[in-house]
Amino acid sequence: MSTASTNSSLYTLDARTKRRNAAEKRFRLYGMAAVAFGVLALVVLLSSVLGTGLSAFRQTFLTTEITLDEKALDKSGTRDPEVMAKVTTIGYAKVLQNALVDELTAKGLLPEGMKAKDVGGMISKEAPAQLRDRVLANPDLIGQTITMNVLANGRIDGYFKGRVTMESAALDSNVSPEQLQLAEAMRDAGMLDLKFNWGFIFGPDASELRPEAAGLGVAIIGSAYMMLIVLALALPIGVAASIYLEEFAPQNRLTDLIEVNISNLAAVPSIVFGILGLAVFINFAGLPQSSPLVGGLVLSLMTLPTIIIATRAALKAVPPSIKDAALGIGASKMQTVFHHILPLAMPGILTGTIIGLAQALGETAPLLLIGMVAFVRDYPGAPPEGFTDPAAALPVQVYNFTQRADPAFIERASGAIIVLMVFLLAMNILAIILRRRFERRW
Amino acid sequence: MNTVKLTASTLAIVVASTSGAFARDNIQTAGSSTVLPYATIVAEAFGENFDFPTPVVESGGSGAGRKKLCEGVGENTIDIANSSSRIKQSDIDLCASNGVNEIMEVRIGYDGIVFASDINGADFAFTPADWFKALAAEVVVDGAVVANPNKTWAEVNGDLPAQDILAFIPGTKHGTREVFDEKVILKGCEETGAFEVFAAAAGGDEDAAEEKCMALRTDGVSVDIDGDYTETLSRIDANKNAIGVFGLSFYQNNTDKLKVATMSGVVPTVDSIAAGGYPVSRPLYFYVKKAHLGVIPGLKEYIEFFVSDDMAGPDGPLAEYGLVSDPELAATQEMVASETPMAPLN
C-alpha cells in the first residue's frame, strides 16, 4: 500500500509498528477485562453466599431449669424406660413450657397477659425430643431439677440475626413483637445467647416446623460414603483401563472406537447416569433405594471417563526415553510400566482423580432418580452395612433447603453451600499439593 | 499388582455388602411436594417417639410418586405415595398389572390455595370471574369471542385497583395448577357466561368449551412458575405489581412478606377452609401398598400415627403448619385401623 519511507529511524516508530503495538495493547486489555469479569463474578457469588450463609453457623440457645415431675413423665413410678416411652414428645413439650413459664415468673420477666403457649412457642420443637432422650436414657433424673440448654425457635433466632424485626413480627403469624421483647429481656438476664452451632454441621436434617435444628450430618456422611465408593471403584478400574489402552493395546479400529466413546462419555449429561443407575442397580440388581452404595456406583460410572482421560494424559507425559531405557536393560513391558512409568505418572493420576471426585461430590442430578433427594433423618450405620442405609448428600441438602417455605432455611441453604465449598476447596488444595510435591519436570 | 489386588478387594467388599438380603427396616415414601412438609413433620415425630427408624420421605411430584408405588411389590419398591390429587384409574391399572392389587387411600386433610401479593401493595378482593377475565386467552365481550383485551385489574372489575395484570401461577406439572384451572378459571368461565358462548361456538361440545376456558393468555401477563413457591415469592419480590398463587401453608410461613387476597369475599384461613367457605381448596392423600403392611416394620404404626389426633387433628402440628384438618378424620382413623383397601374409583 504505502511505500516504505527512506528516512526511517529506529528511534521513531512508523505507523505500522504503532498499529501493531496498539493492537497488542488492546488485546492485553481484553484479557484483563476477561479476568476482571471472572473475579467480579466470583466476588459477587462468594459475598452473597457468605453474607447469607455464615449466620447458619451461629444459633440462639436457651438455658432453662426443668423440674422433671414424676406425675407427668412416669405415672407408673416404675422408672422403666419402656413404660415411660408412652409419654410422647407432646407431653415433654408441656413440661418444658411449664418450666420456662415458672422460671420467667420467678425472675419477674413474664409480661402481663402473655399466654403460656406463646412462651412455649419460643422453644424449638426439637427440645422436647432432646429432653425425652435424656430422660429415657437416665430415668433416675425424674424428680430432679436439671438445667437444659436447648435451641430457641427459628424466629427468635432470626431476630438476633436481624432476619426478623419488630415490624415484620407484627405481620408474622408465627411470632409476635411481645415474644421478641421477652427474648431480649431473656438475653439480658443471660437465659438466651448465640453460640457456635455444631448441630448445623453434625446434626441431621429437620422438618419445616423446626428449621433451627436442621443440620448437615447425614448429608456429610452420605457424601463421604459415596466418595469412598467412587475412589475404591473408579480409581483402580480407571487406572487399569488407561494403562492397558495406553501401553498394551494394539492400535486398531476397535481401540479407536473405545477411545472415542470414552471422550464422549465424559460429556454425557450426568442425569443419564442416574437413569442407568435406576434401571441397572435398583430395578435389575435389586440394590436398596436412597443408599450411598447405589449413589456411589452411579457416580463411579460418571467419574470413570474423567479419570481415564487424566490418567492417559499423565502416562503420555512420561518421556519415552525412560521407557526405552527400562526396556533396553531388559525389563519386561509390565515391569517398565509398574516400576517406572506409573510412579512418574502418579501425581497426574491423583490430580485427575481428585478433580473427578470433586465433580462427583457436587452432583445432584443422578441422585434425583435413585431416591437420594429425600428427607433422611437417621444416620447411616458404619460401613460396610452403612453403605446400604438411606442417606442424603450435600448438594441434595442444599436443594432441599432452598425448597422449604420457612425463611430460616435460606441461611441454612447458603451455609450448606459454604460447607460444600470448603470440602471442594480442601480437595483441590490437596490436588495442588500432590502435584507440587511429586511432579517431576524433564 | 497393587491395582489388581485393590480392585479385587473392592469388588469383594461390594459383593459382601450387597449379597445379604435387604431386610429393609425403614419406611420409604415418595410423591407430592405439597404433602412433603407434612410427611416430614410426621416422619420426624414418628422417629422420635417410636422405636422404628425415621421414614425416608422423597419428593418428586404426585404422579411420579404414584407411578413408583405401582412398580410392584417388594422391598425395593416404596411403601407409600404422597399425592395432592386423587389417584387415577390409569394408576390403578398400572398397579394391578404389576401385582399391586390392594391400595389403601388415606385422606390426611385439605390444603388451601391462596392468592397473595407484596405486603406493601394494594388490597385485592377477587372472584373466580375476575381471574378468568384477567388470564383467559379469549373472553366474551358483548357476545363476541375476542382475544383478551384487559390490561389492568380495574378493566376486569371496577372494584379492583388500577394495577397492571401480572400473575405468577404454578406450571402445568404442579397438582396445584389443576385445582387452579378447575376451581378458579373454569368456575369463572361459567360464572361469566363465557362457557355457554364457547360451547355454542363449538357446536355444543362441552369438552372443547372447557379447554377453551382453561387456555390462558400467552402475552406475558400470566407467567407459569415451574419451580416451587420460593421461586414465586422471589419473583414477587422483584416485581411488586404481581399476584402469586401459593399454598396456604407457604403463605402462613411468610405473612410478613405477603398480603393475601380474598376470594368471593372469604379470607383464606385454616378455619374458613375447614368450614367450606373458602372455595379454592383440595384434599391431600397418601396411598399405602397393603401388601407391605406387616412386612415393613412400623408401617402400620406410621400410618396410624399420621392420622392420629395428635398429628392430623385440629390442634396438631400439621394444622399448625397449615393443613386444614379433615372433619371426617375419625372415619379415616377407623379405616386405617381395620386396613380397609380403597374401593374402585367411581
Image (tube, coloured by chain):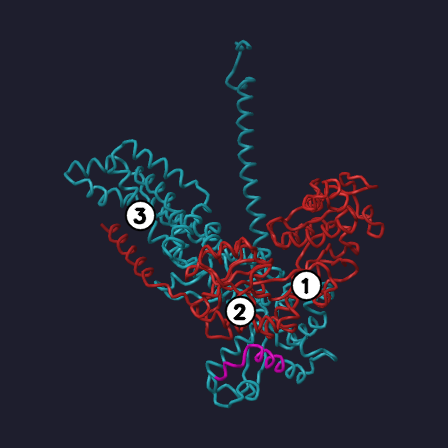
Chain colours: A cyan, B red
Under mark 1, the amino acid is Gln
> Which one is in front, A298 or A437?
A298
Q: Are marks 2 and 3 on the same chain?
A: no
Disc marking residue B252? 1
Instruction: Characterize the local packing of mark 1: few (<14), some (14-19) or many (20 or more) Cα atoms within 10 angstroms.
Output: many
Residue B302 appears left or right of A221: right
Q: Which residues are magenta?
A: A83-99
Vertical arrangement, residue B72 with respect to residue A325, above or below: below
Q: Quadrant of the C terminus of chain B?
A: bottom right
Q: Secondary structure at mark 1?
A: helix
- Tag nearer the camera, 2 or 1: 2
Under mark 2, the amino acid is Thr
> Which one is in front, B30 or A85?
B30
Q: Secondary structure at mark 2?
A: loop
Residue A345 appears left or right of A18: left
Q: Which residue is painted at 17% across and 40% down in the image?
A: A332
Residue behind mark 3: A237
C-beta proximity under 8 Å, tags 3 and 1: no
C-beta proximity under 8 Å, tags 2 and 3: no
- Tag nearer the camera, 3 or 1: 1
Residue behind mark 2: B340
Most extreme residue toward the bottom is: A77
> Which one is in front, A208 or B322?
B322
Q: Secondary structure at mark 3?
A: helix
Q: Position of residue B172 (x, y in %)?
A: 62, 48
Q: Main secondary structure of the magenta part?
A: helix
Under mark 3, the amino acid is Ile
Q: Quick check: can you spot residue A417? A: no
Q: CA distance from mark 2 to mark 1?
A: 34 Å
Q: Is residue A85 magenta?
A: yes
